[in-house]
Image: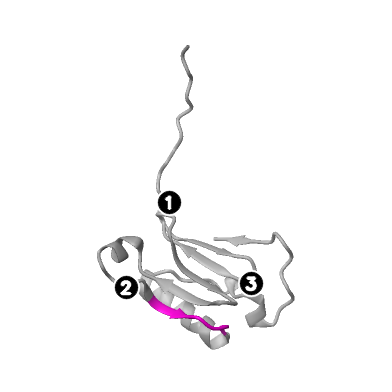
Amino acid sequence: MMLDFEQVDLAVPQGPEILSDGVSVWVNAPTGECIARFGRGGVDVHRTVADQVAGMPECLACTHHRPDAAAWAMFVRETARHHGVVIADKHTPRWITGAATVSVGERSRE
């Protein structure tokens, strides 16, 4: 029996992916790894997995407490500084801006 396979494009994306849902923000490297996240539990801006495997520490700018507007500004600044990723204002969590709560399932993708 002969199988007919469809060719799939497995090209690596050329840039980062920024996902937000009005509550949290995730920044993924082109390799798919999460390099930064911001949410009610804190801020994480991490080194890439390759850097960590090479012996470098994981955290570049991390907190483990409920963040505020100053922490959001630090997250945006440090993500740009360490990874060259500019996070647009549209990704600012609504609980930071004071806007209404996000609807379940709503997501912005850049």
Residue 92 occupies quadrant? bottom right
Identify the residue position indicated by label 3 in the image.
Answer: 23
Label 2 CA crowd tier, 10 Å (few <14, some 14–19, many 20+): few
Spatial separation of the CA atoms under disc 2 and disc 1: 26 Å
Residue 75: x, y in percent? Answer: 48, 78
Of helix, strand and loop, which one carries label 1?
A: loop
Residue 49: x, y in percent? Answer: 35, 61
Report the amino acid beneath label 2: Pro
Q: Residue at x 60, y 77 (%)?
A: 40
Spatial separation of the CA atoms under disc 2 and disc 3: 27 Å
Q: Which residues are magenta?
A: 60-67
Residue 110: x, y in percent? Answer: 54, 60
Q: Residue at x 69, y 61 (%)?
A: 106
Identify the residue position indicated by label 1 in the image.
Answer: 13
Q: Is residue 23 above or below residue 31?
A: below
Identify the residue position indicated by label 2 in the image.
Answer: 57
Q: Is residue 77 above or below residue 20?
A: below
Report the amino acid beneath label 1: Pro
Dot placed on the residue nearer the N-terminal end, 2 or 3: 3
Report the amino acid beneath label 3: Val
Q: Residue furthest top?
A: 1
Label 3 CA crowd tier, 10 Å (few <14, some 14–19, many 20+): some
Q: Are marks 1 and 3 in contact (CB under 8 Å)?
A: no
